[in-house]
Amino acid sequence: MTTPCLPARDSESIQHAADLLRGGGLVGMPTETVYGLAADAGNADAVARLYAAKGRPRFNPLIAHVTGPEMAARLVEIPKLARRLMDAFWPGPLTLVLPKKTDAPVCDLANAGLDTIALRAPAHPAAQALLRTLDRPLVAPSANPSGRISPTCAAHVLDELGERIEAVLDGGDCPVGLESTVIAVLGDTATLLRPGGLARDAIEPLTGPLASPGDTAAPASPGMLKSHYAPSAPVRLDAHEARAGEVLLGFGEIAGDLNLSATGDLAEAATGLFAALRKLDAMGAQAIAVAPIPDQGLGEAINDRLRRAAAPRDET
Ligand code: TXA
Ligand code: MG
């Protein structure tokens, strides 16, 4: 049977997706960053199926998605600094790791038994509608097999996980294109665990310089594997031209076989990055070479993903 692809704008689709999730199902959910694979955060059986569907190691905790600060307060303690970040950037591509409340409606498997939970309020209207309808948090890792490229449209989800899920809500292409920025807030210290769709320069005016894991007591993100976001072909970085057998992903003046942004716009490059890697991979070249990307603004997250895509595959 083919997996239903439900138009996310229809309220009937949202109702149907909500019913599937209430019944312990797995549903592909559009967010502004990437598509997530959603399950009811409080349903341990559904969450176990979710880890299995992705082939995700169970020590790698999931992000709980909420409508906003009010639903977040059911799950976690909210230090003042975290509240200021929520007020400034939610809904949007910012995930906060905060101390878990003992009665949080999230099963232990969802946050890998830690005493913290990562949570974010997605801005995509379909994700918000689904969360409002259910009035419960949804865990949703990116909807790709573990270690592979994150999906930025419904077709990517169906291609790779279609057989293992109940449905996907089609909300079009993801406007941000990179996963959320993950920040742990312990008291008044903010630690950057994963660069992402909200750039450091936007956050630091509120937090001061972000700490790195290792500088502070905040645990590193257990899921930050060295090799990740990997296409099938090996990836070579900082390339100014393609060598024999390679296809080239360009940026700015380096045109390449595909150009992430001819004008050198980092937001445009972020939006198209994962789809471009998929397209180049499908060309069947021996390797994918990638032009240098400046490390400013969203470039920090783009380069983080590219380094992982290029990392030796046996080091996961
Ligand atoms: O944009 C996004 O964040 C997407 C969309 C679907 O919301 N989701 C996403 O989820 O990227 P996932 O599971 O692929 O990445 C979650 C990241 C992992 O690096 C994980 O280790 C980290 O967040 N994480 C989750 N809970 C944590 C916790 N309690 N402490 C530290 N890191 C945590
Ligand atoms: Mg992921």
Image (cartoon, rainbow, N blue to C red):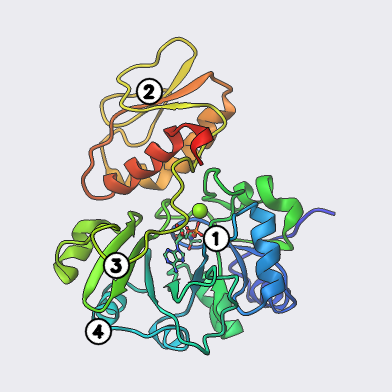
- Amino acid carrying mark 4 in the image: Lys
Instruction: For marks 4 and 2, give the CA distance.
Output: 47 Å
The residue singled out by tag 2 in the image is 256
The residue singled out by tag 4 in the image is 80
Q: Secondary structure at mark 1?
A: loop
Sequence-wise, the earlier of marks 2 and 1 is: 1
Q: Is residue 47 left or right of residue 178?
A: right
- Amino acid carrying mark 3 in the image: Ala
Q: Secondary structure at mark 4?
A: helix
Sequence-wise, the earlier of marks 3 and 2 is: 3
| Tag in front: 4 or 1 | 1
Give how far across and how far down residue 62 sits, in percent: 52, 65
Sequence-wise, the earlier of marks 3 and 4 is: 4
Q: Nearer the viewer, residue 294 or 224?
A: 224
Q: Is residue 66 left or right of residue 159?
A: left
Q: Around disc 3, counting alpha carbons within 10 Å, would you say few (fewer than 14), some (14 to 19), or many (20 or more)? A: few
Circle number at residue 217? 3
Q: Quadrant of residue 134?
A: bottom right
Sequence-wise, the earlier of marks 3 and 1 is: 1
Q: Around disc 4, counting alpha carbons within 10 Å, would you say few (fewer than 14), some (14 to 19), or many (20 or more)? A: few
**Label 2 CB-ligand 2 distance < 8 A:** no
Residue appearing at x 42%, y 87% in the figure: 73
Cβ–Cβ under 8 Å for marks 3 and 2: no
| Tag in front: 2 or 1 | 1
The residue singled out by tag 1 in the image is 59
| Tag in front: 3 or 2 | 3
Instruction: For marks 3 and 4, give the CA distance.
Output: 18 Å
